[in-house]
Amino acid sequence: AQSVSQHNHHVILSEAASLELGCNYSYGGTVNLFWYVQYPGQHLQLLLKYFSGDPLVKGIKGFEAEFIKSKFSFNLRKPSVQWSDTAEYFCAVTPSYGGSQGNLIFGKGTKLSVKP
Amino acid sequence: GAGVSQSPSNKVTEKGKDVELRCDPISGHTALYWYRQSLGQGLEFLIYFQGNSAPDKSGLPSDRFSAERTGGSVSTLTIQRTQQEDSAVYLCASSLRLVISATPGEQYFGPGTRLTVT
């Protein structure tokens, strides 16, 4: 069965610090990968996605993620966080083919708290 | 509005009662998904609709859970004989997905329905 692991439950950073949130997935085939963000009191929204091509993808608000196939990883990064980045971040995976394509398998999320 | 809407936003029910949760997807989105977000379990996939049919019901936790979609639009998730472990936020998402083999479109999530079973 597919699964997604996010290594950090809660990360606390000061403004301007660099961020890296880990995500590893378990699936033998080709996958599509996503990071979603949920700001306090708001809906889940897509931060960035990887389907194919350049393994370094850029998303909104200065976030980027790198797909490393050999490590089954898709870590999220941002060089300098802001207080407004305080949110919960979810990594998700879906198979590229087959009947389950599109059904997102989520990690348990990482809460990011940024101190002003 | 242009987004996914869900109703009610909050529902408190007594154990053993049935509940219906509603999702209005973005107009024109052919695919509709239900997820559940609970403490300790994170976000779990429940069921997916392409049009009015549900090719993947693998995530439904028990036969007390069912869902339908009519007219390729509104969907209802029904939980019969609710139990305390059903307490969670139920999220609906929709996307453009014209054929099963196509690259899935971005899923747009609704605000969720917070279900509390007492």
Image (spheres, rainbow, N blue to C red):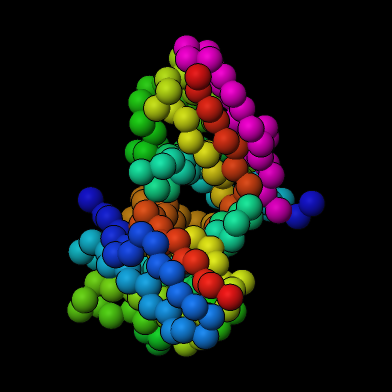
Whether residue A64 is situated above or below residue B62 in the rendered picture? below
Whether residue B84 is situated above or below residue A83 in the rendered picture? above
What residue appears at the point 28 percent right and 80 percent down from the top-left corner?
Answer: A68
Was residue B19 drawn as part of the magenta stretch in this picture? yes
Q: Left or right: where does residue A4 sit relative to residue A57?
A: left
Magenta segment range? B3-24
Where is residue A42, by image quadrant?
bottom right
Specify whether residue A52 is in view.
no
Q: Tell me where residue A22 appears, x and y as whole percent.
A: 32, 71
Specify whether residue A115 is in view.
yes
What residue appears at the point 33 percent right and 79 percent down from the top-left corner?
Answer: A67
Label total for image = 0
Was residue A40 drawn as part of the magenta stretch in this picture? no
Q: Tell me where residue A7 appears, x and y as whole percent.
A: 29, 64
Q: Tell me where residue B74 appears, x and y as whole percent.
A: 66, 37
Say which of B108 and B28 sits in front: B108
Q: Left or right: where does residue B74 sit relative to residue B89?
A: right
Q: What is the residue that sits farthest to the top in this orientation?
A: B16
Where is residue B96, by image quadrant?
bottom right
Whether residue B13 is situated above or below residue B106 in the rendered picture? above
Whether residue B50 is situated above or below residue A95 in the rendered picture? above
Say which of A44 and A104 sits in front: A44
Say which of A2 and A7 sits in front: A7
What residue appears at the point 52 percent right and 71 percent down from the top-left corner?
Answer: A114
Q: Left or right: where does residue B37 sit relative to residue B23?
A: left
Q: Left or right: where does residue B35 sit relative to residue A83?
A: left
What residue appears at the point 48 percent right and 15 percent down from the top-left corner?
Answer: B15
Q: Tell me where residue B111 appears, x and y as whole percent.
A: 63, 47
